[in-house]
Amino acid sequence: MKTKAELYDLDVERNLIGSIITYAKVLDDVRDLLCEDCFSDSLHRHIYAAALTLNSKGEPVDILTVTDELRRMGVADDMTPYHVATLSNSVLGDYYYSAQVLAELLSRRRAWEAGQKLIGKALDLTFDLTDTLEEVNDSLSGIFSTPASSISTIREAVAELYENHINRNLAGGTELTGAPTGFKDFDAQSGGLHAGNLIVIAAETSQGKTSFAMSIALSAAMNDHAVAIYSLEMGKAELMARMAACASGVAVNKLLYNKLGEIELKQVDGSMHKLMHLPVYFDDKSTSNIDVIISSIRTMVAKRHIQGVVVDYLQILNVNMKGSNKEQQMAEVARRLKNLAKDLGIWIIALSQLNRDGSNHVPTLNRLRDSGQIAEAADIVVLLYRPEVYDANYPHPFKDAPTKGTAMVNIAKGRNIGLASFLLFFNASTTRFEERTIPIPPEVKDGDNPF
């Protein structure tokens, strides 16, 4: 029979702590499984507490920051930097499994302690047996509690539904419950962009994915929703040029490569005065590593209080999954972005490429490049189509609508919002999408999805 002392595993503790202070993604992935009591070694407990404190402040977790935080906590001595550095060399591969091991060992220790309490008090006739059983039952009920329990009762869910939705609607609350996209048909269908949602915008090359996302980000920022933008292909100046072109009406290529005329300069200056005060942030690091981006997003939430993120684009992101293929990697990226949006209470827009189909350029969900699981992870999938690029027509029922300078926005997946399609004007020189005043065939109703 094992003793309580045997319900610890110092090697697993040491390796997991080493992984936490070496790799940024580890803490994010295991924090919901662990608490300080999972660690038997006092230094391990203190390091884990320090890591949580640093992470909550949006600061990096590494050897230097952990050592400094331990000093602030008053638990460091002259040997602490050496011990922390030594632990950083004790890393492991399957860290999530190791976290599960430590969580289970903690549950077993709690069960052992409850059992010992029951045995001790059952043998002591001075204790009331009913009180003893109630006390032990309370201990047992907390065995599988997590540091941040996600379990709620149906009563709590009903209360939230009434408070956040039904009562507001009865009171004639605003139709828009999320960040406004700037497109009335989209907002009417979705109520805006909501916290916890992953929105995928997909299209073939040169269809306007980035421009559409920038338009949405600009609209959200103009309505006091702070937004962070991560582009793996463009620098902040190029992205800013697109925003400025949308706001000023001056062509992007003129902003970037030509001398502006006096009138154009006034237009740009006027728009810049408004844009420069918006809560929009760029992380210009030249990295495609998903771990680095997720760490940056967490920092942005903690320090800049962002409410939305744009990532351009999925297929260029790298994930550390040895032996995996591209489809598995893209599925993992989409899953992690969705979990991050839910965990942080923000919306995330991720752009995606489509596989080419030379015989039919009309975008569909099954053409999402590299992984059908991208659509599964997403709450909303928006497909963009500009038939003008291919000298083609719109599909039924928009087949008679003009294609020159227009684009179709197809909500091909809409968890909780349904499906819909609508047309917008698209100005290629300014990369600007505008509300439609486009003649639509009479048989098409607003919100109809032609697919």
Image (cartoon, rainbow, N blue to C red):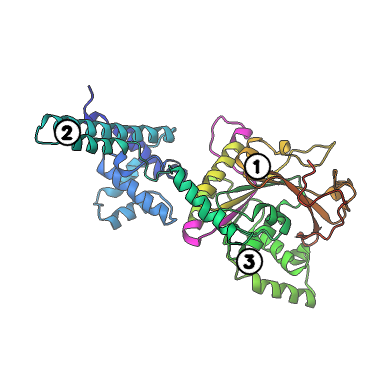
Q: Amino acid at mark 2?
A: Leu
Residue 282 appears in the picture as rendered:
no
Q: Which residue is mark 3?
A: 222
Q: Which residue is mark 1?
A: 315
Label whose residue precedes the other's in the sequence (2 or 1):
2
Position of 66 with respect to 303 (left or right) is left
Q: Amino acid at mark 3?
A: Met
Position of 162 with respect to 62 (left or right) is right
Question: Which mark's residue is nearer the viewer, 3 or 1?
Answer: 3
| Residue at left offset 78%, top offset 66% | 254
C-alpha span from label 3 to label 2: 65 Å
SS type, badge 1: helix
Q: Amino acid at mark 1?
A: Gln
Residue 216 appears in the picture as rendered:
yes
Task: Judge by depth and name the residue closer to the eye, 310 or 75.
Answer: 310
Q: Residue furthest front?
A: 170
Residue stretch rendered in magenta on the structure: 301-329
Q: Position of residue 108 (x, y in %)?
A: 29, 31
Q: Looking at the rendering, which quadrant does residue 203 occupy?
A: top right
Mark 2 surroundings within 10 Å by alpha-carbon count, few (fewer than 14), some (14 through 19), many (20 or more): some
Task: Judge by depth and name the residue closer to the eye, 356 or 187.
Answer: 187
Q: Position of residue 58 (x, y in %)?
A: 44, 55
C-alpha span from label 2 to label 1: 63 Å
